[in-house]
Image: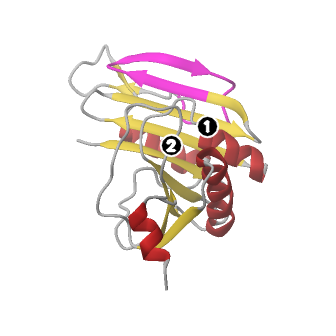
Amino acid sequence: MGTWTAFYVEAGVEETIAACSDWLGAKAHKNVLQNRGGFPARRRFYLRGDAPRRLVVGAASATWAEVHVDGFYSPNPAAIAVSQALQTRVINTIAQTTSDSYELTIYERGEQRRQLAFEEFAWTAQEGKALAGEPMPLATKDEDEEDLEDFGCDEIRTYCQQVFGFEFWMDPAGRAWCELSPEKRGLLSWLRRKP
């Protein structure tokens, strides 16, 4: 069981870091700190607010960057802005296995092209035209209840591999990451910057 909130950018990691940093800095009206290394041990999720406050960027494949987000945003303003800034395709994903809720939204150059949302054995959104390579049918029959459909982690993983060539919900351990967060402007932050 778990929660997954990330978007995938059809671009290199460094250009994705730059676009995410520009967006986060403009949103927060602050400098953005970059902390490079492994995946951050602590993950805070914000259930309030209109946009992400922290992003963690790494490689999903040779041609896709993966950006972890600190909360649930649909639509995700960071994903839309990065798609527009880089004039590329971005796939926003939200998955929550406990509530059996999944969403996949595809943006091209900042415009929504496709949205698939599924919650507790029912589609809540199927918008936009099917993409080349899209698995048909999208959902599979539930193992326990044959008259019910399922569109969960396995189906999203198949979708992302077949249509885009990256693995959804891949273990972040052992890969290089860059955590982006607005600079804190309190007394302690000021003291740490002093030589």
Residue 84 left/right relative to 51: right
Find disc 2 in the rendering and name its residue: 52
Query: Within the image, what quadrant is residue 171 found in?
Result: bottom left
Residue 184 left/right relative to 99: right
Q: Are marks 1 and 2 in contact (CB under 8 Å)?
A: yes
In space, the residues marked 1 and 2 are separated at their CA atoms by 8 Å
Residue 57 percent across, percent down from the top left = 52, 61
Residue sitting at x 63%, y 49%: 29
Residue sitting at x 32%, y 19%: 120
Q: Is residue 126 magenta?
A: yes
Whether residue 80 appears in this view of the structure is: yes
Residue 77 numbered tag: 1
Number of labelled discs?
Answer: 2
Residue 133 percent across, percent down from the top left = 63, 41
Residue stretch rendered in magenta on the structure: 115-136
Residue 132 percent across, percent down from the top left = 68, 39
